[in-house]
Image (cartoon, coloured by chain):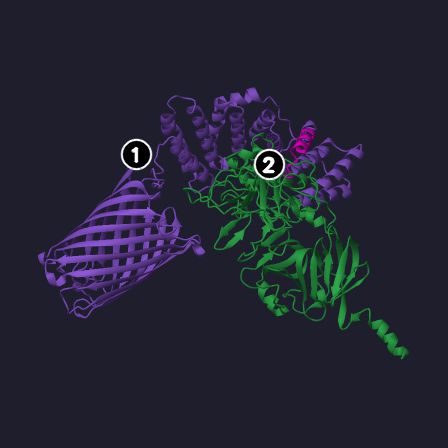
Amino acid sequence: MIKYLLCFALVLPLSVWGQAEVARVKMLRGEASMKLNGKTTKLAVEQAVLAGSIVETGDKSFVRLIFTDKSQMNIGPNSEMEIKQFGGEDAGVIDLVKGKIRSQVSKDYLQQKDKDKSKLFIKTPNAVMGVRGADFLISTNGLATSTVLFEGEIVFNRLDNATNIDFSTDRLEAVVMGPGTARMQPGEFSVQTAGGVQPTVPAVLNVQQRETLESNSDFSGSRNPGQSTESSNSSVVPPGLSGESAANQPEALKNEVAQIVDTNTVTPAAKSDASTASGFDMNGKVKPTNGSFLHVDSGVVIPPPKDSVFDANSNSFIPAGGGQVTADGNYQPPKDVTITEGGKILIQTGDRVVEVKPASVVMGQGATLGDVMKAVTVTATSPTAGSTTLGAIGAVQQITGSNPPPASSSGSLLPPSQPPIEAPTLCSTCGGAIPGSAANSTGLTRVNWLPGTN
Amino acid sequence: MRSLNLIFGLLFSTVVFAQENPTLTNDRSFDASVASAYESFQQGRYLQTRERLTILAQELESKSESSKTMKGLVAYWRGVTANRLSEFSAAINFFEQAINLDYRPKDIYYEYGQALYASEKLKPARRAFGESYKRGHKRGVSLYYLGFISQTLRDEKQAATFYRSIESLPAEEQEGTLQPAKMQMGDMFLSKAEKRPDTIKVVETYVIPYYREALAVEPESKLAKDIQAKITSLQQKYELVLFRMRNGRATPVPPYFLRVAQDFTYDTNPVFAATETTNSEAKQGSVVSKTEAFGRHSFFYKNIMSFAPELRGTFTRHLKREPQIYRNDNWVITPALRTSYEHYLNRKQASLIADVDYSYSNRDRDGTEDLKFNSRVTTYTVGERIAGLFGVGETTVRLRHRTFDSYLDTADSKTNGIGVEHILPRKSGQLYIFNLGYDQTRVESKVFDTNTIFLRGDVILPVWRWKITPQFGFGLTLTDPINNDDRGQERTLNPSVRFSRPLGRGFRLSVHGDYMQNQSKDKANFAYQKTFYGAELEYVF
């Protein structure tokens, strides 16, 4: 009997009713809990996490899990994640219901024989990612999913009905390898928008944001302005000149440094191609401009304004104003702009709040969101900012609202949790009288930003 | 060019010092730090580069034996990195440190000038770009900066000199600056023109032609769209071109339309059906070449009426040279005049239309390889076009009277008809076109009298993959030969499909296929079926 009890005592920590330990809590900040078989327990450092567990984190909280294959998974604040499957011969499956995961997945996961197959799948309500050993960030608000790759290799694709259907790993592999998949390279990001036909073609993330996100693996950075000591809204590119023409070739510095060290041993820079760096939107495929910011919480992409200079080293455009990167690596819009977690972009112009719907994430194809942000920043300091912000951008039709917006706690904009009442969507190319153009009682207007209208 | 040199002489007195090469260091760890900073820089990791360069700079400060050149290199490099991080104040300090240390690589003044320009320190920026130009670094772009800064400083004479100097540079040194330079010249002309009493004349005579010159440098560039927008905006502002009629209906811009097209179609059964009263069935297939030219110019009386004379000419030749086939060779010339009177009907945008079409054709009707007079057709149409009658889109109701004068007197006819057309654009990008019509045709030889109902629906779908625009259509014609029971009630079915794709520079390629079947009791003379499919290349001027 004693023998049996001993065996039971040894086996119990490893397995509860057949559910094996797959990870252990190695770091914890704030509050986090684990749900398993209907029971909720608070997580603690060194606590075992079992397959089938749902891990939840609170506001400003963070959990670091180390998996049995030494993979590391950092779960960001306000996140919910279920470990569907981990261990055994099959690839692992993680279901990220909401929030963010920063993960460094070991290449040796389970030492799978087929090196061409994904070692781990992370699925969200509308996307699935196949990981083959990588350092990446994935975030979802339940509607859109965005991902940034720092090292290694991942494939990322749209997933239909992800919430209700329990996919097998074979099915998930077929999805990530299916049509429209985004095969990402380090430094790139991709977004599967709500209702999008396929994820965006991978594009190079803004260089500052990439570095800041990469160094903020434990979600410890604040939402205050980040590492840049100075933020400028001015551009080095004068009107009329392209960012590519204004760019200075890095060869000059190379020649200087070559006199000190052998520059040939330095890892070559990314392949530079300003024509493709501008992005494209054709035949249902959308590639944002290289150098775009990513609003990680919502998946909104903010392309560089059109007067951004091209940087051959990173093969991306360096935005000249229109927001900045916070210390935690997120994108912070200009003062009078709010991007809600649900992806709404609200701009306060004078006594009105305008919702902007960007149509293009491609530089040079109409006014992009980056151009809007820039115009807002530039006019924010002007005494007539309220009336000129949108006028400066041009090609915008809006319903005139004369009443002030509902007061928020900050006295600036609607809080993200309070959905604004929307006016009818307008078409800026329709011409003629605008139906329902009477004053909107909330002061909120909605603007459709169509390509080619500026 | 002499004046340019003079300006440089006056503006820039900086002496270019001979550049000392950075000496190799004997400190391996320092060299490794330089290499790692360079690797970060090359990979575009500028925050990391900044950190590494800060450490390098501190190391150099702590070593008394550090060379001026090495310090200069690090200061210059920190300046370049700061520029990439849009930290322009810091960049200016670093570049000034490097310059003060006599460390002046070829591009330092260019980078320094950019930092100064972004910091709105325009006069020092102009001096820096002048130095950059003198050193031969990105001469075209440096001149553009010089021009733009001078323009901003309202020194327009100098600005013009700098902009014009770009034209004299070799093409490879212009680096995309010629078009914006010409556009800026246009802007300067405009600001001068707007201060004159004869603004409209100056805008039309000097400003717009200058913008057009800028446009011609690279018509497909991104900037070309902005330049075209400037032209359009001026034309609107000064009413140089009419853009909208008084009821808001857009006018065609430009007011002319010219198109030529060449089509090759394989027709399984060539039939000359255009306005004939009988159908001649060849019962042999042939490739048919059809060449067409079409031109129209719209004129406007104030913003009330429009007149659009147009001319269409077609020449059709069958490549299979059998008399039964080539008797359908023909040419047709069709001048027309379209007029419209713009008004409102129940607050809806409306146009009263009145058109006259005349069509003259010759045909090889005897199969003798000689095109002889075949017919002349005159059509008078009056109608009303109303926007928003049925939801979105435009509805047109037309009444028409047509006289057909054939080489064969017995085939002469008169037709009275009514037609309704509705064009329905959908938000999803599809465009639907519906037609319904009724014609009464009375022929000299009463046996050919007919009453005809026709229906047709077409849909043009949004652009598919590879810029292909698909179009599908189906037509049904019901003909009642009222005095000829032998023919019975005839039906003509005509499904069609067309895929077209722009090829750039005004060219468009289409492939198309049609099936046509005419069902008649008089199978010998009136029943036929045919399939034709082919390709058309068109060019729109």
Q: Is residue A34 above or below residue B73?
A: below
Residue A405 position in % (x across, y down) = 59, 40
Are labels 1 and 2 assigned to the same chain? no
Residue A16 position in % (x across, y down) = 78, 71
Instruction: Look at label 2 and name its amino acid.
Output: Thr
Instruction: Look at label 1 and name its amino acid.
Output: Lys
Q: Residue B302's image quarter?
A: top left
Pick whichever, B191 or A76, lies toward us: A76
The green-coloured chain is labelled: A
Q: Residue A183's image quarter?
A: bottom right
Residue B90 included in the magenta stretch of the image: yes
The purple-coloured chain is labelled: B
Secondary element type, mark 2: helix
Residue B417 included in the magenta stretch of the image: no
Residue B85 position in % (x across, y down) = 65, 39
| Whether residue A235 is visible | no
Q: Quadrant of the N terminus of chain A?
A: bottom right
Image position of B334 (left or right of B514) = left
Identify the residue position indicated by label 1 in the image. Answer: B302
Q: CA distance from mark 1 to mark 2?
A: 43 Å
Farthest bottom residue in view: A1
Q: Which residues are magenta?
A: B84-97
Secondary element type, mark 1: loop
Q: Chain of mark 1?
A: B
Identify the residue position indicated by label 2 in the image. Answer: A377
Q: Is residue B39 above or below residue A375?
A: below
